[in-house]
Amino acid sequence: MSQDIYCPMIHGGININLKDNGLLTFNQCCLSRTDLQIPSDLTTFWQSEKFQSIRHTNNKNIWLEDCGQCKHIESSGLKSFRLSMIEHFGVKKNLSGPLRIDFLFDRSCNLACRTCGARSSTFWEKHLKDNNLPVNIDFKFTDNLSTIRNLLETLDLSNLEQVQFCGGETLLGNTYWEAAQMLADLVPNAKDKLLLGFQTNGTQPVPEKYYDLIEKFKLVKFMISIDGTHDRFDYLRWPADWNQVVDNIFGIREKAPGNVMFFIQECTSCLNLLYFGEVGNWIKKNFSSNRFGDQTDHGTQLAKHPYLDINNITQEYVDAIKGTEMEKFININWKENSVKINEFIRETEKFDKLRGQDWKKTFPEVANFYSRYFK
């Protein structure tokens, strides 16, 4: 009997991207890499041929190419995004409108994280330009709020249970809060059923003037990106400071309204794979719940990065993690790729020089696994 791979994001999800100079593209899931332009007739795009096709494929229990990350994580015995969404939504098909919307509409960000890039961060763009490095994008500021309102007014929101704001840095400025006010006004019974999520790097406070708005939703979850602790965090989330971020998220926990909860998002790459478990242990000791005892969730996603992919590792690295939970992340058909490893070392050290960092000192055990590649 074939595995049931029903996915709520295929049947009830929509990922809407307006970051590319206001051009609207969409797909079914925030992990998907296939984007299509939204048609001019917004009243029918929820039932578009694209969505109908992937729903039909999912009904036949066939993995889509875009679903590779969930497939890989599940084959490793870990909880995927798909399984997490089943826990949240259950099984629902033939919907008149989305269960979950992921919005990407503002690149404004104050960090240049190693696993990110200029497409998702204005600070990354500035960092490249300041150092006369190619940017390969030409984004202009676009006010997307009117477009978002048009979309929300067009979609059937009667089934909507979750909206996720993706950055950029969602707590930087007022844009995402203005979009939150739209949702509070437009979604029926938002106070009783709608979960609103903010992906955040943890550097920004939550202004008290928005506390009343937060309480207009059933739940507001701050999804904080933490890929390591102390100096490893500072390296990966440059130029963030670990102590400042810890103080800030502790402050949010102590002051925010009672319907605020937390989710720690970890991005696993070849740099921090060896230290998998470090963030989880920190959460257990220091940030296991909000102040009312509601559990802090913790999840891992694999870095989608050309140089920091977890498979850009050496045989020594593989031998070191053999028999541990970390081994599950490695592709079963893994082979050492010297070309990609040399690219990883070259690009990492290029930005080390620009930022005054040294990956060999921050990740010494990992660096040792690559020592035979050092010139």
Image (cartoon, rainbow, N blue to C red):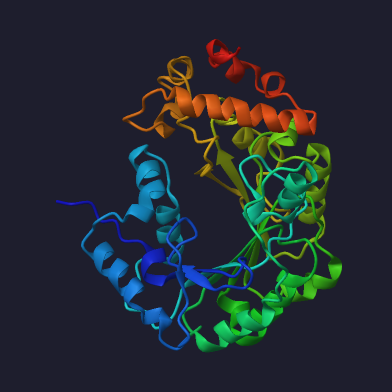
Question: How many dots with numbers?
Answer: 0
Q: Looking at the rendering, which quadrant does residue 58 occupy? A: bottom left
Percent coordinates x, y for residue 227 in the rendering:
63, 38
Question: As displayed, is residue 357 above or below residue 194?
Answer: above
Q: Is residue 82 left or right of residue 157?
A: left
Q: Looking at the rendering, which quadrant does residue 351 occupy? A: top right
Q: Residue at x 79, y 50 (%)?
A: 203
Percent coordinates x, y for residue 282 in the rendering:
67, 35
Q: Is residue 156 left or right of residue 60?
A: right
On the question of residue 93 being in view, the answer is no
Question: As displayed, is residue 127 above or below residue 373?
Answer: below
**For this rendering, which residue is in front, 286 or 270?**
270
Question: As displayed, is residue 176 above or below residue 43?
Answer: above
Percent coordinates x, y for residue 259 in the rendering:
68, 66
Q: Is residue 216 left or right of residue 331?
A: right
Percent coordinates x, y for residue 279 in the rendering:
63, 35
**For this rendering, which residue is in front, 222 or 156?**
156
On the question of residue 105 being in view, the answer is yes
Q: Quadrant of the C terminus?
A: top right
Q: Residue at x 68, y 65 (%)?
A: 106
Q: Residue at x 81, y 49 (%)?
A: 248
Q: Residue at x 62, y 81 (%)?
A: 147
